[in-house]
Image (cartoon, coloured by chain):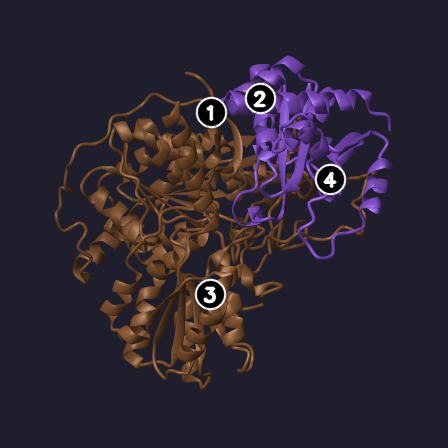
Amino acid sequence: MKKDIILAGVGGQGILSIAATIGTAALDAGMHLKQAEVHGMSQRGGEVQSHLRISEDEIASDLIPEGKADIIIAVEPMESLRYLSMLTHEGWLITNTTPFSNIPDYPDLDRIVEKIKSIQNHVAVDADAMAKAVKAPKSANIAVLGASAPHLGLEIGKLENAIRKIFATKGEVVVQQNIDAFRAGLKASREYKS
Amino acid sequence: MQKLLLLGDEAIAQAGIDAGMSGIYAYPGTPSTEITEYVQSSREAKEIGIRSNWSANEKTAMESALGMSYAGKRAMVCMKHVGLNVAADGFINASITGTNGGLLVVAADDPSMHSSQNEQDSRFYGKFSMIPILEPNNQQEAYDMVHYGFDLSEKMKVPVLLRITTRLAHSRSGVFPKQKKEQNGLKLPEDLRQFVLLPVIARKQYKRLLSHQPEFVRLSENSDFNKYFDGEDKSTGIIACGIAYNYLLENYEGKNIPYPVLKIGQYPSPLKDVERIYDECEQILILEDGYPILEELIKGLLNKGKRIRGRLDGSLPRDGELNPNLVGKALGRKFESRHAAPDFLRPRPPKLCKGCSHNDSFLALNEALSEYSRGRVFSDIGCYTLSALEPLEAINSCVDMGASITMAIGAAEAGLVPAIAAIGDSTFTHSGITGLLDAVNNNSPITVLILDNSTVGMTGGQKSSALGRIEQICKGIGVEEEHIKVLKPLPKQHDENVSVIKQELNYNGVSVIIPRRECIQTLNKRMRAKHKAKVADIR
């Protein structure tokens, strides 16, 4: 099993927590992992992305080749489209639909959603609303992770264990909020009709 | 031993701890910052007493590390590539003095300028000082090279340069640690004149360095970090340096590469292997993530030999970071992507945080300057450099650490009066103080804004060497007390701040204005920690 994953969002939206969770679950499954992060200047409210590669075999490159990503997981709709050329022919685009509009010329959201829905394999969910509905307003990122879970090739139980591990230092309340958000995303994804 | 999941930077730090390092010296700079931060937050490092406080700049870091080496202990010094420019004096001369305890210099280059003003290749500096250079292709090699580098430094009595790039620094992967080593004891050099670079001694020491060069080549030829892989198809031979080797492997997805391949991780280049691949193959493709250093060397000025392909002949782009696709294209691969990003997407550049004090400082400065012609604000390296972009468009230069004050001096002397310098607190103590001294000695008509957010903001909130000292430093240098003004950069203070700045712009001498308000990121972090402690208390 091998999955090449692009994570996308805006600095501060928590894509590194998604990466850490998938990474922890993959290690738990005895897999190899490489994850290229973005630090420094680009974090200040700018676009951020991370290349996450998990595989049963050794991984050579830290970067995923163009057109070879199996999944794009995005916490923001415009950012979900920015790395589209990275996606393989049958790849999955999993994204939040709530925009993070911190630029004056943010494009028309309808056009963005239309483009997302034109991708054959996609899941577009309002992760912000889902996270709020389960009283976990800060966990929209983990709701998106939940929406991606059926396509990661990892056991759901292993992903939930990873969430418990990653958020353990923040206390039981935060852990449960993230589990709830994850499950809400997972449910929405399983019921999703494109 | 258990496998650790580490960033390249963290692998280097853990290796330092395991290899008996006694101290790490650094000034924060992307992508090198996490090396020192890892040591600072390591309980193990604390227990065994590894010193790890931030230095005022890369030069002081380099020299302190050299001092620790003089005293017989292992020292690491870390910096981003442009930091090596600041440390260059000490760095180059350390190859002449040689070392006593192991001295490892880590330079983190930033091809593609993700967070930098240029993409200079630190291997040039290593070659310039004629010392061995190590360049890992993955996190495990980065870890192993720290152990090897310290041993090599002690064996050959020279500093060793470990060169990494952003991609390795900030990528996470599994690392197997090695057996831990004890720190060295205090032991001075056998020759107490070894570090005295008087010409008569320096000439001898320089000859020693020169005489070691053939041995450095021999060590590279026998190094485990340099490997020759034979291939049936001799139409092309491939030399892949550092992380570029991974991109080559990626294009064959675990299958055998048909061409002979020379993987290089240690310099000076392994001459025998380079000669073999050149003689065996019809043409050579060179993959380097950085400047085409090896390519130039092998090609030579006249390029009358075999065809050498790489960044200089257009097989690969001349600038920017390599990736699997670029390397694939150089190998004649074609890539097709069914998907393409739509053209209506907009860039989302980084910007100052909501509530950032710099925003209020520049709004006030912009208004105070509205009666003058534009183009008089010289600035520096830090978060505030973002004020060059919309909507503030407040500054007109960003060159190197400290250049704001000194460029303002020159511009004022050319007739641009008033000229303004805008520099951060940490950048000021890094390299701004000497410039301010020049301004005082010249009585230059400049207004210096020292934007004091009480931290090194851009790299994530490290402790600033300037903390609580700025006014004292300015007074000590000789700035007149009545022209040192402290402001509170807040929207409600705006009018008052504008009037103070206007007043100082009119002064025909050196003024220092210090807009002081804590970085919103470190403030939030502090408040969260305080809240957490309070909650824990109640429980």
Q: Give the colour chain B carries in the figure.
A: brown
Residue B28 rendering spot, x and y as whole percentages: 40, 48
Residue at numbered disc 1: A169
**Callout 4 touching callout 2 (CB < 8 Å):** no
Determine whether the residue tagged by mark 2 lies in a helix, strand or loop: helix
Percent position of residue B483, x then y: 32, 75
Could you say whether the residue bearing mark 1 is in a helix, strand or loop?
helix
Q: Which chain contains the residue that carries disc 2?
A: A
Residue B153 seen in the figure:
yes
- Which mark, residue B63? none
Q: Are marks 4 and 3 on the same chain?
A: no
Do the residues marked 4 and 2 share a common chain? yes
The answer for how far apart the CA atoms under marks 3 and 2 are is 45 Å
Q: Which mark is residue A163?
A: 2
Most distant residue in the bottom direction: B415
Q: Amino acid at mark 1?
A: Thr
- Chain at tag 3: B
Toward the viewer: A53 or B210? Answer: A53
Task: Give the Cα separation between the discs numbered 4 and 2.
Answer: 23 Å
Which of discs 4 and 3 lies nearer the camera? The answer is: 3
Q: Which amino acid, by three-letter code, is at mark 4?
A: Thr
* For discs 4 and 2, the disc positioned in front in the rendered view: 4
Chain A colour? purple
Q: Which residue is mark 3?
A: B493
Binning the other alpha carbons within 10 Å of mark 2 as few (below 14), some (14 to 19) or many (20 upward) gives many
Q: What amino acid is at disc 3?
A: Gln
Q: CA distance from mark 2 to mark 1?
A: 11 Å
Reading the chain from its start, which is encountered first: label 2 or label 1? Answer: 2
